[in-house]
Amino acid sequence: MNFLMKMLFYRCGLFLTALLVVRFQSAEAENDGHCVWYKVCSDKDAEFKKNCLYNGTPQPLLDKKAINTVISLCPDLVGVLMIDDENPVLCCDAEQVEILDKSVSTVLPYFSRCPSCSRNFLQMWCQSTCSPKQSLFMEVTDTVNETRGISVSGVHYLMKEEFATGIFSSCRNVLDPSTNQRAMNIMCGGLMDDECTVAEWLDFLGNPSKNPMAPFEIVFERYKQASVNISGKIMYPLNATVFSCAQATDNNTTPCSCQDCPTVCSEMIPYPSYEKKRCFIGHMDCLVFVALLTCCSVIVVIVCIAVVHHVLLEKEAVKSSSLNDKMPIGVSCGQQALLNADDVSSCAKIGAWLENKIEDKFHRWGVFCTRHPCLVFFFGITVSLICTSGLCYMQVTTDPVQICPFYRIEQLIIVPRNQTQFVAADPLDNVEFHWGPVFRKEFLHEILQLQKQIENLTVQVENKPVTLKDICVQPLAPEKTECLIQSVVSYFQSNATNLDDEYYEEGFLLSNWLSHLRSCLRNPIQVMDTTMFKMSCLGEYGGPIFPYVALGGFEGSDYISSKAAIVTILVNNYDDPKANEKAQAWEKIFINFIKNYKSDNLSISFKAERSIEDEIERESRSDVSTILISYCVMFVYIVLALGQYDIRGYNFLHLLSKILLGLLGVMIVMLSVVSSLGFFAYVGIPTTLISIEVVPFLVLAVGVDNIFILVQAFQVEFFCFTLLSYFCIIVILSKRGHGKGNEDVEEQIGRITAEVVPTMLLCAFINASGESFFALCGFGDIF
């Protein structure tokens, strides 16, 4: 009996010991945490895949590709979880890792400017997807039966306040490279800047009704405590490593830029600030006082100099009146005596010497031209003809890319004739809005129809059909071959069915085209909108349609009140003109199509890339008649303004009326224009039709001015005149002269040339220098 009792107590002791050991091990395992899910239970063709419910220990990840992906995305997670330095023990398999990689790859580009933000954002999702201690900070709240097992459809995600705030703060000011707006505005469902808070951000990420990309409901709970009691269970909110945007995540990265992280800017040494102290003398500002004092001083000095100079002149006049008989030769009564050489400065001597030399050279040149008119005439005509022959090599630039480079686009600005707004409610929340006239469904349908017709335009180039798809920009080619078109109907993927679609539930309208537009205007990069449609806001080409590009006639960011729709088509552009031949041919029929398009509901303004080129060519050719008329008018003006009609007979009418002067002068101006164009053609410098239009007017103005200066100088000088630049006129008019005394014609022309032509030379030099300055500075061929 005693033996049996002993054996019973012994076995009871062993059993209790075993229970305590199991209990201790269970408690230790509970404290270490375990998985709440593992593997994927959703069908392979499911839009959003859910993980299988799993309350077990983490499993080793054996797939090499998945391991490399985890190491790349989650370096903080796998650092201490390796078996045999090769395989990490995680709560995710290769398929879950692949889903994680695809999910974050659509978001990370928005944070790509800031490595710290990207690392923190990945940390949050890596921990929830693969952490071997999921049960410590995640609690499954809902499940659903699927073909491959029970999947998780709802969780509570517990995290420390400082962890959530750290992630949000590091990403808050990061700008999206594609929109130059805060990336967090997109992650908050369209809330702008300060409206986006940590709570709003986390709520949007985990709420499928707000975020169409959320696969199931995730309730983010933030705690300041290190541990919390949830329904009798001790849990430890996640508090993983977080990097500030001013920190580098490793030795291979740098902190975020000042533009994306104000903290970095604040660490810069501030500029010293100085307090501005204003100076006053009495009630007057010191600067005003000094300016007035300086002005008064200058006036006083000038007055004193004038008085002294006047007194000295009076004294000299008195002395001169008493010494008239002793005046030097060449000095008349009342004049001052000649200065001595020592009284003249060196600069004055150099200036006088240079002026005398220039006048002497031009005097000789005028005499030479008058004495040898045939030689001068022949030489001038020969040089002009040689230069003019260069027109055979002239290249005319009409391509606006070479004149002023910019992108190749085709653009339509479409305005409805009915500009009245309409009031309509969004069925999603039954809130009424004043919608702009562009959002009427019939107007959108007409834009869609017009856009489709444009896309189907075909032209033959080298016996091959060319459509818009052959020349347009396709950012996602070869996966997607749709053209990059920014248009309001692209919110519906340019599909009339999507535009007409309506969503009803139990007979009640819950979503229509206005619901979709409202959602897309708030957040144009949504892959699925927040309506019942779950329709994408992206265009057919696979990218966003920004409302400030596709709409017009709105104030600020009130896109709903837009009064115009803008269709922008981006076309490939090349430096090689031959490569653009297809685009130019298509643009030609595009322009003709829009010109002939008739509609009672809308008016269209348009621009194609070749529009500028066509307009330049059209304007230049239409102005040929204007140039000819202006030259004829100048000819008549010369004849009327310079002609002398006080004659005693008609024998000298052809000479005195200056008909030949005007005719040959205008001809020489034209010859100067074509000679200059030919010369630069020889050099290989191309010109533009605008230059060909402008230069004749400039040369005509200067040439006519020179004719007037020369002829009127001759007429003032006793009607003795000469022409240096216009050699043929010299031949006709040089025989007539009325010089001073016995001065012959050659000397008259030489003297007037020496007086007048240096001024013309200076004017020509200044004009040439100005044009050369523009050419050297690269202002473009337009100038």
Image: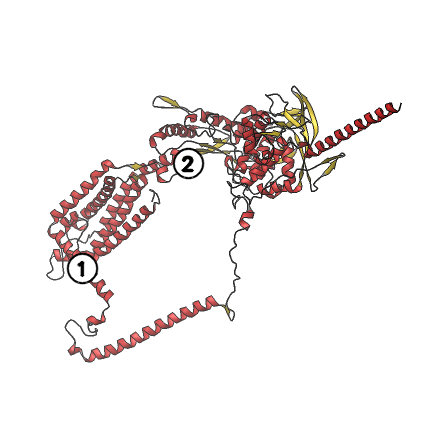
Q: Is residue 146 left or right of residue 500?
A: right
Residue corresponding to mark 1: 357
> How many angstroms separate mark 1 from mark 2 (CA)?
56 Å
Q: Residue at x 20, y 80 (%)?
A: 322
Please report the residue visible at 18 percent of the width from the left and 59 percent of the height from the top: 357
Left-right relation of 136 to 746: right
- Observer able to see residue 435: no
Tag 1 secondary structure: helix
> Where does residue 544 sit, x and y in percent of width and height?
52, 33
| Residue 84 found in image quarter | top right
Of the two numbered discs 1 and 2 on the same chain, state the one appearing first in sequence: 1
Point out the image quarter for the N terminus: top right
Q: Nearer the viewer, residue 29 or 543?
A: 29
Give the residue furthest to the front: 3
Q: Position of residue 353 (x, y in %)?
A: 20, 62
Which of the two residues, 615 or 712, is positioned nearer the viewer here?
A: 615
Q: Quadrant of the C terminus?
A: top left
Query: Eyeballing the image, is 194 above or below 337?
Result: above
Q: Position of residue 320 (x, y in %)?
A: 21, 77
Indicate the amino acid at tag 2. Tyr
Q: Which residue is mark 2?
A: 407
Circle 1: residue type: Lys
Q: Which mark is residue 76?
A: none
| Quadrant in the picture for residue 378 | top left
- Given residues 353 and 331, the one toward you in this image is 353
Decide: is 632 above or below 83.
Answer: below
